[in-house]
Image (cartoon, rainbow, N blue to C red):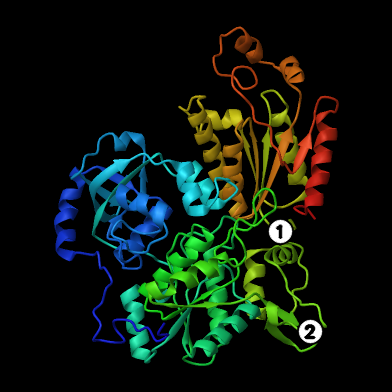
Amino acid sequence: MDSTVTSPLIDQEKPALLINMLVPAVATEYKHLAHELPTLTLTQRQLCDLELILNGGFTPLNGFMNQADYESVLTNMRLQDGTLWPMPITLDIDQQLAKTLQPGDEIALRDTEGLLVAILQVEDCWQPDKPREAQAVFATTDDSHPAVSYLYHQIKDFYVGGKLLGISLPHHYDFKHLRYTPLELRHVFHQRGWKKIVAFQTRNPMHRAHQELTIRAAELTKANLLIHPVVGMTKPGDIENYTRVRCYEHVLKTYPENTAFLSLLPLAMRMGGPREAVWHAIIRKNYGCTHFIVGRDHAGPGKNRAGELFYPPYAAQELALQHQQEIGIEVVPFQEMVYSHKQACYFPVDQFPQDETPAAISGTELRERLHKNLDIPVWFSYPAVIEELRKAHPPRHKQGFTVLLTGLPSAGKSTLANALSLRLREMTDRQITLLDGDVIRTHLSRGLGFSQEDREANITRVGFVAREVTKHGGIAICALVAPFIKARDHVRQMVSEVGGFIELYVATPLSVCEMRDRKGLYKKAREGAIKQFTGISDPYEPPTAAEITIDTASSGPEEVTESIIKQIKLLGYIA
């Protein structure tokens, strides 16, 4: 193929194909009428998708997919009209709203602050087969894959499709100087006289290996470099984007003048491996790029529960290369870059000298070095980048963390939580917040019942508070029955994004819990006076990977508390 694919603003003879969904006249009219329409407050992922539909990043999409396009994408990686498009872009809604909708209806779409961002003109509404979608798009139904987990546990049960009338792009207060729409970025390239642009996709901080890779890619393609990191949604547990963007700004200074440019991409990644690589290439084509770097295991989520990669290492490169000509962008496949101590430079792993062992530091090892305040070698990264990472990831004994005590009613959770909070106050100056189940039910979760939905809502509320405490360096101690693994894992994910998380399973046997029951609730449950009671009429799902497991049947509170303190020290959260 011709490697000098040009963008509309570089070659004025070629018509612009980007869809601009913002319609000022319509916006003025609908701002007055929208209060009469059904309203949907968009989630973070929905907002990311909507922004890229409206600004042209998802061209040729002009709205959220209808069922015909959705089915075609699942089956053929193409829209119904045959256009290559590998990822379903859908708007999920609950059953209550779905029941009220008919083709031709309109829905006011709003951000979390209530700002009207678009009007959806409804074409159809349907209930998807989620396992089928997972298998078709992600080649697995295993919910250890983050996108499959999101599909099963976060996405609502119905999809609504239709065209969008754009009212306003989602507003960003942060890093405004680095946010460019596709047309704005193409204009930047035109002003700089750049004819070839190679894009680098990343969701992680950049280190010396990434800088070396991108310089080689630019030299190979004789192109200028666009560093185009994702700042929408990435893999749970990734370093948050504020720290990453500061790192990118430091790395940008290491490139020769007028050879590299940094712009942020408000994309919600799916970690879909091969399909995602094709999707990313289409998006970069829309942003005016002529070349796109695809690395080993591009957009892969890592390993499944069996310890195996979800996708073969080079599957993403192979699929992207297969479709590059149709997309109109040249794919630049690259190997992992590793360091040679003997030659003091980086090599692609397949070109590394055979008489030497390559040096590399994995993401897991880097996090461990940060948590333990260990040295990070100069050959690996830049001092300014490491400084930013150390600010965001202090050693564990300086981090905020949450302890979630879970177990059957009357297992001893509240007693241990209170004792643990007092001992920790004695040992540390960090602020400690005790969130006890009974107190939470009285205040934060007043009005919730004991259905599975209400129980999950209760623990999610507690998780939100614990996350805020942890984010600001405090310690949250939560004592809840929390009977469902899914809900506990959701809290783990929420808290782990900002600090430490310890699941503490109080594994007291049911018979002992019944003997200790001061309120007589077990007796009432067995007699049928209480219809929903965990351990009797309702199930309890024991943790399978708790950081700490204790049995209070044969030990007193003081002895057990000291055992917990010892184990928290071993985990590194107390010096």
In the picture of the structure, the residue carrying the numbered disc 1 is 398
Image quarter in which the N terminus is found: bottom left
Quadrant where the image shows the C terminus: bottom right
Secondary element under disc 2, as helix, strand or loop, is: loop
Q: Residue at x 40, y 50 (%)?
A: 43
Q: Position of residue 348 (x, y in %)?
A: 66, 80
**Residue wearing tag 2:** 341
Location of residue 410 by image quarter: top right
Q: CA distance from mark 2 to mark 1?
A: 33 Å
Identity of the residue drawn at 47% across and 70% down: 322
Point 66% across, 63% down: residue: 393
Could you say where residue 170 lies in the image, as x and y percent from the top left? 34, 61
Q: Is the residue marked by circle 1 packed among few (<14), some (14-19), or many (20+) residues within 10 Å? A: some
Query: Mark 1 belongs to which amino acid?
Result: Lys
Q: Nearer the viewer, mark 2 or mark 1?
A: 2
Residue 146 drawn above or below residue 319? above
Nearest to N terminus: mark 2 or mark 1: 2
Q: Position of residue 310 (x, y in %)?
A: 61, 55
Q: Is residue 257 above or below residue 330?
A: below
Can you see residue 176?
A: no
Foreground of the two, 420 or 402: 402
Residue 532 falls in image quadrant = top right
Helix, strand, or loop for circle 1?
A: helix
Q: Is residue 443 above or below residue 190?
A: above
Q: Tell me, yes or no, if residue 200 can be seen here.
A: yes
